Structure formats: C-alpha cells, structure tokens
Image: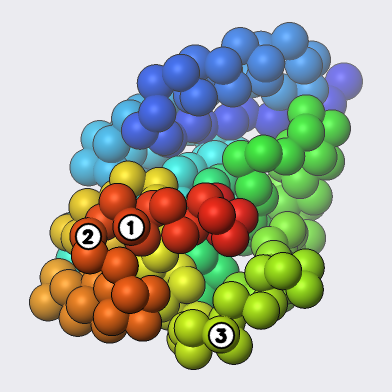
Amino acid sequence: MTPPIKIFLADANFLFIEGLSVMLSTIADFELAGMTRNASETLHQVQQVQNDIILVDANFFFQGHCTFGQHLREVHRGKILVLHDAISVSCLKKITSLADGFLSKTASRHQLCDSILAVVEGRFIKQIKGSLFASLNSTFQQELVSRYELTPREVEVIRLIALEFLSVEIAQKLCVSEHTVDTYRKNITKKLNVRNVAGIVNFAHRWQLV
C-alpha cells in the first residue's frame, strides 16, 4: 500500500488554511503534516516536521527583504507548491525558480489534488495566466489601457489598491521601494484624473479590474 503524501500548509489567512486542512483530511491519499501562519514560523517548522510537499502562500515570498523563498529552498527538502490569489503575474515570475509549481487559490478541489500529485511526481505546474493583459480579455477592458495610457505595472498597482493593500504592502509584493509605489500612485492619479484613493478604487470596479 502506497503511503499517503504528507502535506504541510503555510498561509496567513486563518479561514483559508483551516478550510484547506479540513478538505485535505477527507482525502485518503493525503496526510496533514503541519500548519503555520507566518513566514518565520514556516521556515522553523518545515525543518522539524517531515513532509513531502508544502503548500505555501505566495505573499510570504514578498515580505521583508524578499528572502523567504531562498531560505525555504535551503531548509525544505520536499516540493514547494505556491498558492496565489490576486498577486500579479510579474511577481510570480520573480519566484519561478524557487517553486515546483503554482496554483490559484480559486482552483477546484479536483485541480488542487491533481496539482499536488503532479508536483510530488516531479512535474512542474504553472496554472497562471501567461501575461497580465491576458485577463483584460474584453474590448471594454482593453479600451481603458489605450484610453488612459496605463502601463502593465500601473494596472497592477490599481488592482492592489482596489484590494485594499497599503503602499508598504504593495512595495513588498512588487519588490520595489515604498517611494516607487508612491510615484506609481501619483502617476495613476494624474492619468485617471481622480483626487484620491477612493477615485482609484471606483475606477478599478467600474472597469472590472477586480
């Protein structure tokens, strides 16, 4: 009989990680090895708890000085499957070499199970969009890019602002300085002809960017 795959979970969202752990516990092929809710605890625990694969929040890779990924590779012997939410494609590309696969947090139970098995077997899984503007698939959305002369990075920042991320958090996600994010904000405000963050958020929702 094949032993179950031992899975370690690392995610800051309590409801998400609890729900994921309950779901995985119902699958005979999987065994929950442990859970953590922050980057530093994760780096410590994965050295103590034997596991075949870690499912880790993409946001951990962009906190502090962005060294989490390198440290995880050094201390973790198993596979690494990165779970991502609204993070931009360009950010994920920066950590491609640090992971064995990527999977959206909106994936189905079936997709999650298939991805875990594939990564453990040594197949790289990359279920992310090929480019930022692949998601701008309607004529309605594409019009905004040309009308407002927005760059890909500015669209990323607009989305993150609309998702209620602070400048310091956006800087961590994009691996840039907070000053750079503030510059993006000023340029966006000018291009959109809005007065404040509320205007940017309204714009994002009006053009269905979030």
Mark 2 residue crowding within 10 angstroms, few (<14) / some (14–19) / many (20+): few
- Badge 1: residue crowd in 10 Å (few <14, some 14–19, many ≥20): some
- Quarter holding residue 144: bottom right
Whole-number angstrom distance, CA of label 2 to CA of label 1: 5 Å
Query: Residue 73 location in percent, x, y?
Result: 41, 60
Residue occupying image coordinates x 30% and y 67%: 194
Tell me the amino acid under the disc marked 1: Gly
- Give the residue number, with chain letter if any, for mark 3: 147
- Is there CB contact under 8 Å for labels 2 and 1? yes
The answer to whether the residue labelled 3 contacts the one labelled 2, judged by CB atoms less than 8 Å apart, is no
- Secondary structure under tag 2 reads loop
Q: Secondary structure at mark 3?
A: helix
Q: Is residue 73 above or below residue 120?
A: below
Viewed as shown, does residue 11 lie left or right of 102?
left
Q: Which mark is residue 199?
A: 1
Q: Camera-side residue: 181 or 199?
A: 199
How far is disc 3 from disc 2 in space, using C-alphas? 20 Å
The quarter of the picture where the N terminus appears is top right
Front residue (pair 31, 131): 131
Crowding around mark 3 (Cα neighbors within 10 Å: few <14, some 14 to 19, many 20+) is: few
Q: Which residue is under mark 2?
A: 196
Tell me whether circle 3 and circle 1 mark residues in contact (CB < 8 Å).
no
Relative to 165, is 65 on the left or the right? Answer: left
Q: Quadrant of residue 66?
A: bottom left
| Mark 3 to mark 1 CA distance (whole Å) | 17 Å
